[in-house]
Amino acid sequence: MITTFWEKFCQEQNINTAIPEAWMFGDQTKAMGDELGNLVLEGKKTGTCSAHALYEREKEPLPQVGQYDIILNGDGEPIAITQLKKVTVIKMDDVTPEFARKEGEGDLSYDYWYQEHVRFFTQQFKEMGLFFSTDMLLVCEEFEVVYRN
């Protein structure tokens, strides 16, 4: 299903490039995958962030401007293809209210974003046996939807 979705996009856009990573936003639960995926489809979510330490731990390259990603819903089905427009590595405490709003969640306030991300990263790090601190680096990505199901 994911491969077919990507091939249809490539055919319609007349591009020939390898299939990108397909992933779901959030904590990998159906509820959060559906909620955040819908925000992407509605155009409310145009940004996301992840902990820089996780890229280092997994020895994965950082996202690159121009790259495509296949966004999945809570059932693991492709719903959109996004293209990265901007990548910034910044301390969590230095994230701007403008970027927090681009994440499209809750009441769009910086306070909501900050509280939810402290909760999310604290839990994520705890599960990996790590300690999260708000002065740790985040990889902040800004994207646009270039294709939808």
Image: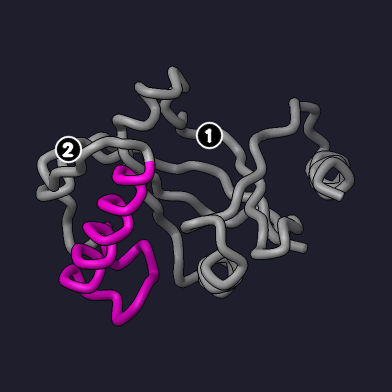
Which label sits on residue 136?
Answer: 2
Chief SS of the magenta region: helix
Q: Amino acid under label 1?
A: Gly
Residue 119 colored in magenta in the image: yes
Snapshot quadrant of residue 126 = top left
Q: Is residue 13 above or below residue 16?
A: below
Q: Residue at x 52, y 68 (%)?
A: 32
Residues drawn in magenta: 99-127
Asked if the residues shown at circle 1 and circle 2 are in contact, with their CB atoms under 8 angstroms apart, the answer is: no
Picture coordinates of residue 34 (x, y %)? 60, 70
* In front of the other: 6 or 57: 57
Closer to viewer: mark 1 or mark 2: 2
Horizontal relation, residue 149 to residue 11: left or right: left
Horizontal relation, residue 60 to residue 13: left or right: left
**Element on which disc 2 rests:** loop
Q: Which residue is mark 1?
A: 66
Q: Residue at x 46, y 29 (%)?
A: 64
| Quadrant assignment for the C terminus | bottom right
Picture coordinates of residue 2 (x, y %)? 81, 46
Which label sits on residue 114?
Answer: none
* In front of the other: 75 or 41: 75
Snapshot quadrant of residue 112 = bottom left
